[in-house]
Image (tube, rainbow, N blue to C red):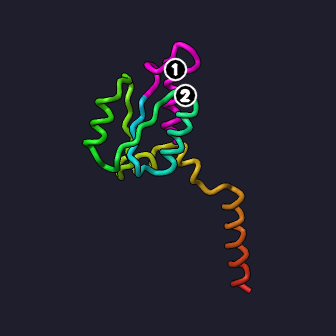
Amino acid sequence: MALMVALRNLASLIAAGNVPVKDEKIAIFSDELNHASIIDGIRLAERQRSVEFFVYKHCDMSHLRELLSNCKMKKKVVVTDRKRWKQLIQSRGRSFIFSTTTPVPIATAGHDVIVAFAFLLTK
């Protein structure tokens, strides 16, 4: 999701005005079975009118090639949810790392439960 928002911001920065015209937009090609967070990020960028969104059939490189060759836009990004990329994002993606950490109040409550349980076992 963070990548898609960054792409949206990039398209806006490249644009001469606030909203990119067709030639300044980024074409995003997404596998139809990509994770929901990827789709949500693309849709967020699409709502800002800085990208155009194309969906290709799952792992169908012929369909993707056809879509890419028919797209006249200069800037193109292909998004896939492959295991190697997923592992990279999970280990290095700041928005993923910080959105999946345990909030401090929940960690503290868990610690308190363990301390209380240990106390009861010693009695």
- Disc 1, SS: loop
Q: Nearer the viewer, residue 70 or 32?
A: 70
Q: Position of residue 99 (x, y in %)?
A: 59, 49
Verify CB contact (< 8 Å) between mark 2 and mark 1. yes
Which residue is disc 2 drawn over?
49
Left/right placement of residue 112 relative to residue 100 reads: right
Separation of disc 2 and disc 1 at Cα? Answer: 7 Å
Q: Is residue 53 above or below residue 10?
A: below
Q: Is residue 87 above or below residue 79?
A: below
Span colored in magenta: 1-26
Q: Would residue 58 be counted in the magenta stretch?
A: no
Q: Position of residue 62 (x, y in %)?
A: 25, 42
Q: Is residue 78 above or below residue 73?
A: below
Q: Residue at x 53, y 39 (%)?
A: 43
Q: Residue at x 59, y 54 (%)?
A: 101
Left/right placement of residue 104 relative to residue 84 reads: right
- Disc 2, SS: loop
The residue type indicated by label 1 comes to Pro
Q: Position of residue 40 (x, y in %)?
A: 53, 44
